[in-house]
Amino acid sequence: MAYTQCRVVMGFTMGEPHGIGPWLVMKALSNPGLFQVVQPVVFGHEATLRHAAERVGICPDRLVRISPTDVAQQARMPDDDRILLVQTDCPGLDQTEDGQPSAEGGRAAFNSVRTAFELAASGHLEALVTSPLSGVSLGMAGYPQRFHTNMLAEFFAEHQLCTLSTDGDLRVVFVSTHIPLEDAAARITEDRVLSVICMGAAACRRFGIVHPRIGVAGFNPHAGEGGILGQQERTAINPAIERAVAEGLDARGPFAPDVVFAKACSGAFDLVVAMYHDQGQIPLKMKNCSNARFGSWCGAPGINVTLGLPFVRTSVEFPAVFDAAEQAEALHGAMCKAIEYAALLATSPLQRVRH
């Protein structure tokens, strides 16, 4: 991938402090070539992050603690290999047991994310890469939102957002993600489907796909079978596709959900529009875990991108992992891919205009 010469000010959240997140961040930042592209700003518990840096051989002097108000100035200093560290509120974390979920870990992870969101919203970060969260820890801390996507939707409620997930080959955008399946049908409106098609097409163009071919999945079995098996295709999905085509997009469908992903994997489409979380996530994970042992992720996890934000946000496609010895390299590869995508999107002409 090609980048501009101007380094991207990129934030990193530590994720669940007792999981693999801090190690993932510091392992990625141990690559000296990354600093030609990125000025990293890491948010979280200083002691935890310094311990993770020590584990991967990063010199302690390279981690420089700054306050949130100093990010704008410090991140624009002449090129160097400093890792700027913003200590966020982590009450009681020092007294918790490593490798276990806890309320203290949930609060620390949430505060890391919230501080990074605030700085990104104020324009001080051009991109943000978030590390895995533990829904258990967040629940123990009393937070109702246990996924980054839900936190983003709440924090940036004035923006129309959607998630794009990819393994590099198969790209999927979602009309809805982390909501109960019984609520997913209500999210399928003509305007929402059209918005997701358009956001997905714009993202593909930023990936270098000038004229993306878009396959739209139906919601019901057999894409509704002409209304016999459901009405969403007739009332919302078909009209949205027609409007997308009228706007000049190569959008086709709706296709039976059990067919459209096979078509995409065979090269027929550059992007698939999925109507709900599992409809798109199952094909992605099956594609990349064909050699996985039961109960262990041994494939190559993908990454996700939140579309519609005033900054770039990417993340790895797996939750907090507390014991990842066998999976560390695959998970590290996903983090590197998330950083690569964040840098690419932040330096694309469309994104630079917005900044």
Image (tube, rainbow, N blue to C red):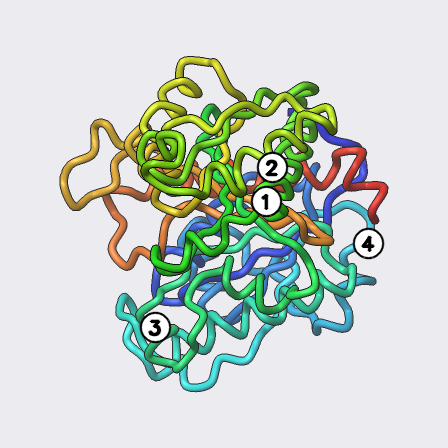
Residue sitting at 68 percent across and 53 percent down?
309
Position above or below: 112 against 192: below
Question: Residue at the left extreme?
Answer: 294
Residue 190 is marked as 1
In the picture provided, is 175 more to the left or to the right than 279?
right
Quadrant in the picture for the N terminus:
top right
Residue marked by disc 4: 77
Residue 222 is marked as none
Instruction: Give residue 71's quadrant in the image.
Output: bottom right
Q: Is residue 329 visible?
A: no
Q: Residues within 10 Å of mark 4 (few under 14, many from 20)?
A: few
Residue 240 is marked as 2
Mark 1 residue element = helix
In the picture provided, is 146 more to the left or to the right than 81?
left
Position above or below: 207 against 48: above
Mark 3 residue element = helix
Nearer the N terminus, badge 3 or badge 4?
A: 4
Q: Position of residue 326 (x, y in %)?
A: 23, 42
Residue sitting at 71 percent across and 66 percent down?
119
Asked whether the residues under the numbered discs 1 and 2 touch, taking CB atoms below 8 Å apart as contact, a structural biologist would say: yes
Residue type, numbered disc 2: Ala
Gap between marks 1 and 2 measured at Cα: 5 Å
